[in-house]
Amino acid sequence: MRFNRRDFLRSLTTGSTGCYVSSILPPARLVGAQESGTTLCRVLDESGRETAARIRLIDAQGRETVPVGHPEALEEEAREGDVRFQRRRFSYVNGRFQIPYDRLPLRYQVIKGYEYGIAEGELNQANVRDGVVRFPLQRWSSLNRQGWYSGDIHIHHIAPKTCRVEMEAEDLNVANILTSDFTTDQDLFEGKINHYSSGERLIYVNQEFRNHELGHLCLLNLKRLIEPVKPVQPYHHPLHLEVCDQVHAQGGHVSWAHFPSWPGVENPLDVAMEKLDALEILCVLEPREFPIFMKSVVPDAEAN
């Protein structure tokens, strides 16, 4: 999602104070191939500086391989750090990583958001120079220069510190981590921009307010959480209309969550009453599938 830089920053920072100091950890020291039998890999941006990225490695037998120090297997519900997306294993690296020299050759894929070309090919022993391999990335677009920020308004199950590294790797400027009834991170809510932010990478812990029949709302730029935070709102009263009013009274922003695949039954009213600031059109849920929980509201709908 793209935000106009001026308007978004005004909305995001209204009522909050303080400076935003980068706290991202520098790349850890990695020993060279001669010392450890590993190959040092460096991901470089268009200016030749090391940059965070998401990588995938496959060996000659088609098996997934991970950098040294990354878990070989992910937990079933792994939610931050290395990820499995569409059955593919990816590792987040902060500009550099190591791989065992004896695992070469490897097929590789290096990804950094949507405005860099994907670097991919085969990494073999001939690519290694003095124990180091370089993966140069090429930027083909820069909407930042046109006054726009890239951002994600709907993120769960990640700590701000980890989020900062992943933001760098995905080339995101804005990340909204949403605490909710099914998460355990309510204590991370501050009502202001998180201290792991910097001038170009802004993290804010906000809230998803949920009722499985009425619908789900992404509440942004909150100064205080909207009750009930836990459990999920079980009643159809008060309607989301009141939630929207409470958020707007704080100077906040309301977006209808995963609109195509989980529309909820109240959204026509909220749209007609002009209570919504945005609709979330793209998300991880499959919009072509039957809306989740809708059959509990309209039991005959699934049969149609």
Image: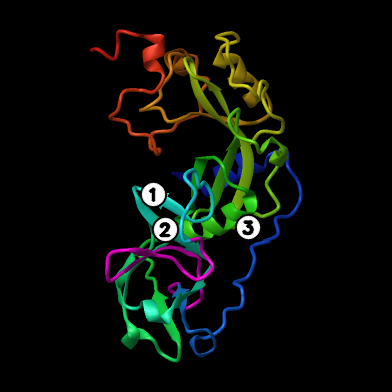
Disc 1/disc 3 C-alpha distance (Å): 29 Å
What amino acid is found at the position of numbered circle 1 in the picture?
Phe
Disc 3/disc 2 C-alpha distance (Å): 27 Å
What amino acid is found at the position of numbered circle 2 in the picture?
Phe
Q: Position of residue 224 (x, y in %)?
A: 72, 30
Q: Position of residue 256 (x, y in %)?
A: 48, 27
Q: Which residue bears the numbered disc 3?
A: 199
State if disc 2 and disc 1 touch (CB < 8 Å).
Answer: yes
State the SS at label 1.
strand
Q: Earlier in the sequence, mark 1 or mark 2?
A: 1
Q: Which residue bears the numbered disc 1?
A: 85
Residue 118's image quarter?
bottom left
State the SS at label 3.
loop
Q: Residues within 10 Å of mark 2 (few under 14, many from 20)?
A: many
Q: Position of residue 32 (x, y in %)?
A: 53, 86
Q: Position of residue 240 (x, y in %)?
A: 55, 16
